[in-house]
Amino acid sequence: MKAATSNNSEVAKWDPGFTKQVIDTVAPTIKLWHRAEVRNLDKIPAAGGALVVSNHSGGMFTPDVFIFSPAYYEAFGYDRPVYTLGHDGLFLGPLDGWLRRLGVIEASRENAAAALHSGALVLVFPGGDYDSYRPTLGANTIDFNGRTGYVRTAIEAGVPIVPTVSIGAQETQLFLTRGNWLARRLGLSKARMDILPISFGFPFGLSVLFPPNLPLPAKVVTEVLEPIDVIAEFGEDPDIAEVDAHVRAVMQEALDRLAAQRRLPILG
């Protein structure tokens, strides 16, 4: 296995051997618990950088990365890494070093560009926590909260956008509200928190972010969609809002299709 080669120190911290160890230990349990399927991995470009853009689900215990990345590595091996853009708050705790060795890098345009230019995949969830805590009643909605930076990142790096959708993780507990109003009332914006989610689940019942309930064994299906060559489809000077609207529309259509195929909550 070959590590990524890049002048960017964040990208260079990826450790393929360590990543394989963690995936071999953790991923089978997550795959079994969620009966996880990842479809159409063959749509990922065979070479060069690509920006994988996905919806984000499941709240604090989102399984998204530990479903997509193991499936990718199982199919293609560890020569080409998957980097995941993460909020800088993730790197403040004791897991900092481990996360970086697993390919989680701080979400900046510089880090994303370095990873993409190295020929790697970069996995981004534009909606972040806002998306992962969307209410259960709106579970099958693509909502990036107006964030379009991922489009600029793909254009500047000259790589395709690979839309990817996931369904099921929002059924792991009952998400009642993002709690935007509660966060504002408590003045949490000073701590860069614009939501304070309220959910109901097992074993604690009602939870206002804490204590975090354990995820129910909802079936999760992830599907990779056709890559989008932004310049080829939208011209040399593309309108960022237009590209973003197109990406979200493609993803919404796919998510609606997956939702129509789902028979029962949790069971899938």
Image (tube, rainbow, N blue to C red):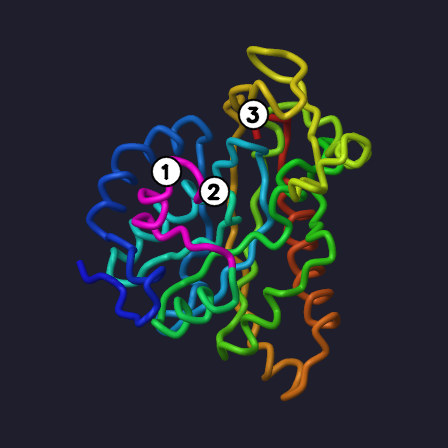
What residue is at 34 percent from the left and 72 percent from the top? 118
Residue on which the image places disc 3: 267
- Of helix, strand and loop, which one carries label 2? helix
Image quadrant where residue 30 sits: top left
- Distance between mark 3 and mark 1 Cα atoms: 33 Å
Q: Amino acid at mark 1?
A: Leu
| Residue 193 spot, x, y in % from top left | 67, 40
What residue is at 69 percent from the left and 27 percent from the top? 175
The answer, for residue 260, to whether it is visible in the render is no
Task: Verify CB contact (< 8 Å) between mark 2 and mark 1.
Answer: yes
- Distance between mark 2 and mark 1 Cα atoms: 8 Å
Residue farthest to the bottom? Answer: 236
Horizontal placement of 39 versus 28: left or right?
A: right
| Residue 23 spot, x, y in % from top left | 29, 40
Q: Amino acid at mark 2?
A: Leu
Residue nearer the viewer, 52 or 109: 109
Q: Quadrant of the N terminus?
A: bottom left
Q: Residues within 10 Å of mark 3 (few under 14, many from 20)?
A: some
Residue nearer the viewer, 177 or 25: 177
Q: Which residues are magenta?
A: 91-107
- Distance between mark 2 and mark 3 Cα atoms: 31 Å
The answer, for residue 196, to whether it is visible in the render is yes
Residue nearer the viewer, 2 or 233: 2
First-in-chain label (2 vs 1): 2
| Residue 39 spot, x, y in % from top left | 46, 50
- Of helix, strand and loop, which one carries label 1? loop
What residue is at 39 percent from the left and 34 percent from the top? 31
Residue on which the image places disc 1: 95
- Of helix, strand and loop, which one carries label 3? loop
First-in-chain label (2 vs 3): 2
Residue on which the image places disc 2: 90
